[in-house]
Image: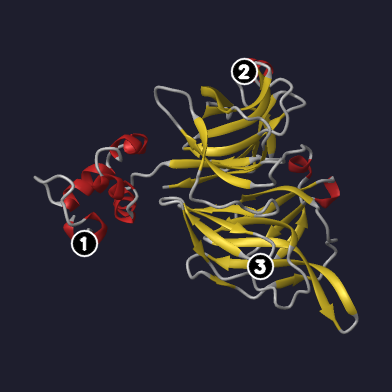
């Protein structure tokens, strides 16, 4: 073990536990569930430094002890601020969405993409990453827009094999004047470098065409505001094609992928729907009918995000006790014999009591 545990000056000079070497203490704490870390950080200043130390998170990764951490980007219409909130998941009390004070306001037009333990943020002209183990900002190279007369707009972002694909509109200055074009920009998160932009000289019109986008089988499926805007992009072959009729038949938005299945909350039908790409068919997640009909009735703009193995979190605003609040339900998913998918609500809590916020996006990382 010691050969992987390099000296860490932030844990010196006093030992964490006098009777044990620091690397042994780190190894012990790495095996403790993350839900106990806030209490451990109260033990001493040394333990607070350990909890925030990259050394601890590196050891957890070496041991294969990782957990999903869920974030929500909330917009305050009064102040105009977009701030990062973390879902504090409690065992003995209700879950809560708590602001991350070390992170500054974000752009309302930003794209937020989780990659490993980081969230990459793409604003109009700049880009950055958030290290979710320490909640610190890390700069990355700005988007290569030197050839463009304006920032990229109407963009979506997804990740495939460690590369972030950013697709949007750029205004280009040519000898014939200014023209708009769909553009693909690719960031390699391993090398932290951008690949040369690719201009899409095809039939795609510019503008806000897409309401959501997910990755299935190494392709990006972009759901259009209109069915004829729905497009599938294959990065490996640089192919563009229309979305299949079955997937395009539902108005999925604010969706997520769990074990290669797409999930979204259908407000009109009060159902959690699932799309299996391999079988090319939609189904309804069983066992949630009563919960969705009662708890989610009259709620708008729900969001789902993966929050663990075979598990998703459903965020939805609703009036509760005379005020607007946000609920979060954690739902365990099970595929039974015959291919049916069943859901079990493990918790449902009011996670934020100020319903004046708008939810911009939910993301989940592995730490």
- Are the residues at dot 2 and dot 3 in contact (C-beta closer than 8 Å)? no
Q: Is residue 134 left or right of residue 82?
A: left
Residue placed furthest toward the right: 176
Q: Is residue 8 visible?
A: no
Rate crowding at label 3 as few (under 14), some (14 to 19) or many (20 or more) other CA atoms within 10 Å. many
Q: Earlier in the sequence, mark 3 or mark 1?
A: 1
Q: Nearer the viewer, mark 3 or mark 1?
A: 1
> Dot 2 corresponds to which residue?
291
Return the residue nearer the eye: 288 or 191: 191
Residue 287 in the image: state x and y as whole percent.
Answer: 59, 19
Residue 257 in the image: state x and y as whole percent.
Answer: 59, 42
Residue 279, quarter of the rendered image: top right
> Dot 3 corresponds to which residue?
185
Q: Secondary structure at mark 1?
A: loop
> In the rendered view, would you say 293 is above or below 366?
above
Rate crowding at label 1 as few (under 14), some (14 to 19) or many (20 or more) other CA atoms within 10 Å. few
Q: Secondary structure at mark 2?
A: helix
Q: Earlier in the sequence, mark 2 or mark 1?
A: 1
Residue 32, quarter of the rendered image: top left
Residue placed furthest toward the bottom: 175
Q: Secondary structure at mark 3?
A: strand
> Dot 1 corresponds to which residue?
7
Residue placed furthest toward the left: 19
Residue 362 in the image: state x and y as whole percent.
Answer: 60, 42
């Amino acid at each position: 073990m010691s050969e992987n545990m390099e000296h860490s000056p932030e844990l010196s000079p006093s030992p964490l536990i006098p009777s044990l070497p620091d690397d042994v203490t780190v190894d012990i704490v790495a095996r403790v569930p993350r839900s106990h870390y806030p209490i451990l950080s109260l033990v001493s200043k040394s333990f607070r430094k350990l909890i925030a130390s990259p050394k601890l998170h590196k050891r957890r990764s070496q041991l294969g002890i990782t957990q999903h951490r869920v974030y929500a980007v909330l917009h305050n219409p009064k102040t105009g601020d977009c701030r990062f909130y973390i879902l504090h998941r409690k065992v003995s009390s209700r879950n809560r969405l708590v602001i991350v004070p070390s992170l500054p306001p974000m752009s309302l037009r930003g794209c937020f993409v989780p990659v490993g333990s980081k969230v990459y943020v793409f604003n109009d002209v700049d880009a950055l990453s958030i290290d979710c183990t320490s909640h610190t900002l890390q700069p990355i190279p700005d988007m290569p827009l030197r050839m463009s007369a304006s920032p990229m707009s109407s963009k979506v972002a997804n990740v495939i094999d460690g590369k972030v694909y950013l697709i949007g509109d750029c205004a280009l200055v040519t000898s014939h004047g200014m023209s708009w074009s769909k553009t693909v920009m690719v960031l390699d998160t391993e090398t932290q470098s951008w690949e040369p932009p690719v201009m899409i000289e095809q039939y795609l019109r510019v503008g806000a065409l897409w309401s959501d986008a997910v990755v299935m089988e190494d392709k990006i499926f972009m759901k259009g505001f209109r069915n004829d805007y729905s497009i599938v992009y294959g990065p490996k072959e640089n192919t563009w094609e229309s979305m299949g009729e079955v997937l395009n038949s539902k108005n999925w938005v604010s969706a997520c992928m769990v074990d290669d299945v797409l999930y979204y909350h259908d407000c009109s039908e009060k159902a959690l729907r699932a799309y299996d790409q391999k079988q090319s068919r939609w189904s309804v997640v069983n066992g949630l009918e009563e919960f969705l009909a009662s708890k989610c009735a009259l709620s708008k703009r729900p969001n789902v995000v993966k929050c663990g193995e075979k598990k998703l979190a459903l965020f939805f605003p609703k009036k509760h006790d005379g005020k607007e609040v946000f609920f979060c339900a954690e739902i365990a998913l099970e595929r039974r014999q015959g291919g049916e998918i069943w859901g079990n609500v493990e918790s449902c809590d009011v996670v934020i009591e100020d319903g004046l916020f708008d939810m911009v996006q939910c993301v989940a990382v592995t730490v």
